């Protein structure tokens, strides 16, 4: 009975984690050298006039040859096992245009794994009242995340 309850609980939590991931991850913007000190917020000092997304250059294997200023870091975290990188780069392009950047330099991605474990042991028998120690079971699951990162820049 308790095993079925625990499995149902674990399945519910798993669906909650994946359901939250299905709500559509978004590109987050973290301004660099922001005089206000507000990390993760888009302020008037860190956001320029929006530009046309079609004009945003994306650099993957090299950096631009012309001088530029670093505006901030763009991140996109997904739990998909095979992420659609083209879609992620397009999301970077849209966010960069919204903050007034001229280009995006794609940075190395970060992969991480989060494991969730539950271990239960019963200190005594509910029927006899005698302790038996070592009883119980463990169950768990893990979720892999990949965080794609890019640097939004403004040409000088």
Image: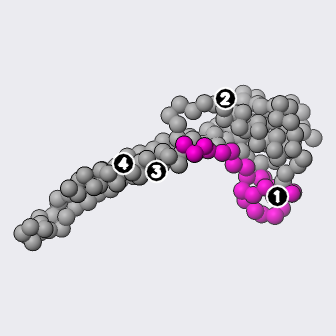
Q: Is residue 109 left or right of residue 63?
A: left
- Please report the residue visible at 76 percent of the width from the left and 36 percent of the height from the top: 93
The magenta stretch spans residue 41: yes
- Of tags 1 and 3, the one toward the viewer is 3
Spatial CA distance of label 1 from label 3 is: 33 Å
The span picked out in magenta is 22-45
Q: Position of residue 36 (x, y in %)?
A: 81, 64
Q: Secondary structure at mark 1?
A: loop
Which residue is disc 1 drawn over? 43
Q: What secondary structure is the magenta-colored segment mainly? A: loop
Which dot marks residue 16?
Answer: 3
Residue 30 visible here: yes
The magenta stretch spans residue 137: no
Which dot marks residue 11?
Answer: 4
| Quadrant showing the C terminus | top right
Spatial CA distance of label 2 from label 1 is: 28 Å
Determine the image quadrant of residue 120. Answer: bottom left
- Of tags 2 and 3, the one toward the viewer is 3
Q: Residues within 10 Å of mark 1 (few under 14, many from 20)?
A: some
Which residue is disc 2 drawn over? 86
Q: Secondary structure at mark 3?
A: helix
Whether 23 is drawn above or below 121: the answer is above
| Quadrant showing the N terminus | bottom left
């Amino acid at each position: 009975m308790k095993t079925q309850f625990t499995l149902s609980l674990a399945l519910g939590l798993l669906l909650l984690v994946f359901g939250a991931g299905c709500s559509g991850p978004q590109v987050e913007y973290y301004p660099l050298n922001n005089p206000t000190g507000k990390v993760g917020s888009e302020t008037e000092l860190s956001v320029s006039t929006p530009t046309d997304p079609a004009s945003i250059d994306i650099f993957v294997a090299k950096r631009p040859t012309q001088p530029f200023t670093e505006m901030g870091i763009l991140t996109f975290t997904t739990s998909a096992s095979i992420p659609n990188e083209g879609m992620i780069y397009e999301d970077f392009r849209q966010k960069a245009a919204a903050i007034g950047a001229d280009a995006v330099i794609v940075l190395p991605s970060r992969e991480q794994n989060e494991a969730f474990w539950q271990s239960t042991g019963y200190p005594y028998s509910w029927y006899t009242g005698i302790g038996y120690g070592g009883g119980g079971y463990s169950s768990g699951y893990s979720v892999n995340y990949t965080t794609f990162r890019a640097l939004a820049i403004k040409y000088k």
